Image (tube, rainbow, N blue to C red):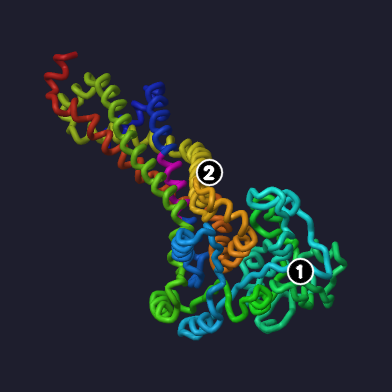
């Protein structure tokens, strides 16, 4: 055990070199720890995302196929761009899928554009400056100034589940409201028009027929979306109702725009999809929670991959740097090593002394790395999340089915059919609910980076491996020589 005693004596005698070695190992361990913290945070975010998605299957319009059909029809006609009616899911088809085994609940959605008759809508920037880049077109022109959002129940709607919308008075929409004219209105709209629970309001449907609605509740929206998305309806002018009422007001009775099914057993998800595909047409598509999970976690997995690469790159670079430092230090101790070998000290004990010295420095370095590593982990993690969020937003913006640059006929036709396009954009309830799950996941917006005991233990294991390999590689030049040759060279 003399080599252990010699190791501590050397560290005390050579304080300057010990501090230098501590600085080098601390730098290596700090960046290894930062990578481990980000990696663990990303893994945790992926797991949380998977739990938040749950086991659901969404039935919606096959937008890609519909747009392909639209291109074909528009190229064969002189009218150019033709609007797409997205409300193509019949309630009977949706109910057939709901009757399949393993379905515990389902949420049907439908939308309609109506014109306020007995009340005044809330004015917004989008209603005065035009929408979608068409100056002079107001929210009330042709397409209606009020949006009816039809659901099976507001309790299952993503906005109410995420607490973006909150019921303030009365109650929300329930399944018992099917085939009724019961609605809930936004707090601002209600306050501006003195609407209370129990009041009756009137709207004009797609056929300009006045329909009376019974107010059973008042909800509050946290913020308006119209400022950030001119094409979206202002929450203040959105009225929630049963999907049957929304379909009726839009002139699509018996149809819905999207359905989300909640399954009782996640292991039978594929069996449900297989059975459902036999019922639905090719114009419809099913989106499983696995697909949702993949989309939600793709950016987080990318961060996890980057963090893993950081760990291994820093570890390999750390071995190389520490090996060079140890080689330089061992060369300065050739005389000491030569004397020990001439006195019969085993080479393994000499290597063991160097290893104990380096491990002792490693223990001190781990304490400093724990302080600095957590800080750098937060900084690097935020930067990676920011870059991934920017990339996701760019891809989302580029993938939208917006204008058709370079085609003046299509652009003119799009302007002429703005009313139908606005309705088409809002008649994708299933798709919008699916998209809100993507954008509403907190796992995508931030990483919970914090230091844990498990991370420190993993860091210690990495440190021992790095020190062990560096010590062996650094000792090769000296231990390959004989004691006599070492002393003569001195």
Image vertical order of residue 444 relative to residue 103, above or below: above
Q: 188 or 451: which is nearer to us?
A: 188
Disc 2 marks which residue? 386
Considering the whole magenta stretch, tell me its main secondary structure: helix
Q: Return the residue nearer the eye: 23 or 96.
A: 96
**Relative vertical location of residue 293 with respect to residue 323 in this rendering, above or below:** below
Mark 2 and mark 1 lie on one chain; the one further toward the N terminus is 1
Residue at the disc numbered 1? 185
Q: Quadrant of the N terminus?
A: top left
Pick the quarter of the image with the C terminus.
top left
Q: Where 237 falls versus 466 (above or below)? A: below
Q: Residue at x 71, y 59 (%)?
A: 234
Q: In this image, 148 relative to 342: left or right?
A: right
How far across and down, in percent of the image, does residue 269 sit? 42, 75
Q: Residue at x 74, y 60 (%)?
A: 140
Instruction: Name the one closer to the observer, 135 or 213.
Output: 135
Tell me residue 230's x, y (percent). Answer: 66, 52
Q: Nearer the viewer, residue 417 or 124?
A: 417
Q: From this viewpoint, is residue 167 visible?
A: yes
As helix, strand or loop, the secondary structure at mark 2 comes to: helix
Magenta highlight on residue 39: yes
Residue 441 quadrant: bottom right
């Amino acid at each position: 055990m003399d080599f252990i005693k010699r190791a501590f004596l050397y560290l005390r005698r050579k304080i300057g070199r010990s501090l230098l070695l501590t600085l080098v190992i601390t730098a290596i361990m700090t960046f290894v720890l930062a990578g481990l913290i980000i990696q663990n945070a990303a893994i945790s975010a992926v797991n949380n995302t998977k739990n938040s998605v749950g086991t659901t299957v969404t039935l919606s319009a096959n937008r890609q196929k519909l747009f392909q059909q639209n291109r074909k029809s528009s190229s064969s006609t002189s009218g150019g761009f033709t609007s797409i009616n997205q409300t193509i899911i019949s309630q009977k088809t949706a109910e057939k899928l709901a009757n399949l085994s393993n379905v515990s609940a389902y949420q049907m959605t439908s939308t309609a554009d109506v014109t306020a008759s007995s009340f005044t809508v809330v004015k917004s920037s989008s209603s005065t400056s035009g929408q979608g880049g068409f100056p002079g077109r107001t929210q009330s022109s042709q397409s209606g100034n009020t949006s009816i959002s039809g659901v099976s129940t507001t309790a299952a709607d993503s906005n109410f589940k995420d607490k973006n919308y909150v019921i303030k008075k009365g109650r929300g929409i329930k399944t018992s409201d099917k085939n009724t004219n019961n609605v809930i209105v936004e707090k601002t709209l209600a306050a501006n028009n003195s609407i209370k629970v129990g009041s009756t309001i009137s709207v004009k449907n797609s056929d300009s027929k006045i329909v009376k609605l019974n107010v059973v509740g008042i909800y509050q929206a946290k913020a308006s979306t119209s400022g950030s998305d001119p094409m979206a309806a202002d929450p203040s002018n959105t009225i929630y109702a049963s999907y049957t009422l929304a379909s009726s007001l839009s002139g699509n009775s018996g149809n819905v725009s999207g359905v989300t099914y909640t399954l009782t057993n996640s292991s039978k998800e594929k069996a449900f999809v297989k059975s459902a595909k036999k019922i639905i047409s090719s114009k419809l598509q099913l989106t499983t929670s696995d697909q949702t999970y993949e989309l939600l976690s793709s950016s987080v997995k990318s961060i996890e991959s980057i963090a893993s690469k950081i760990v291994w790159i820093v570890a390999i670079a750390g071995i190389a740097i520490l090996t060079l430092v140890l080689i330089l230090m061992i060369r300065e101790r050739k005389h000491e090593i030569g004397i020990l070998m001439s006195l019969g000290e085993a080479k393994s004990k000499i290597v063991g002394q160097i290893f104990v010295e380096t491990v002792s420095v490693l223990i001190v370095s781990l304490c400093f790395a724990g302080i600095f590593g957590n800080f750098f982990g937060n900084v690097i993690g935020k930067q990676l999340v920011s870059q991934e969020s920017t990339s996701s937003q760019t891809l989302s913006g580029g993938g939208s089915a917006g204008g058709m640059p370079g085609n003046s006929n299509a652009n003119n036709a799009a302007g002429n059919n703005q009313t139908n396009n606005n309705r088409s954009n809002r008649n994708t309830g299933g798709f919008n609910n699916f998209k809100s799950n993507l954008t509403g996941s907190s796992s995508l917006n931030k990483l919970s980076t914090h230091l844990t005991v498990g991370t420190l233990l993993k860091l210690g294991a990495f440190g021992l491996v790095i020190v062990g390999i560096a010590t062996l590689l650094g000792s090769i030049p000296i231990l390959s020589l004989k004691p006599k040759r070492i002393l003569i060279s001195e």
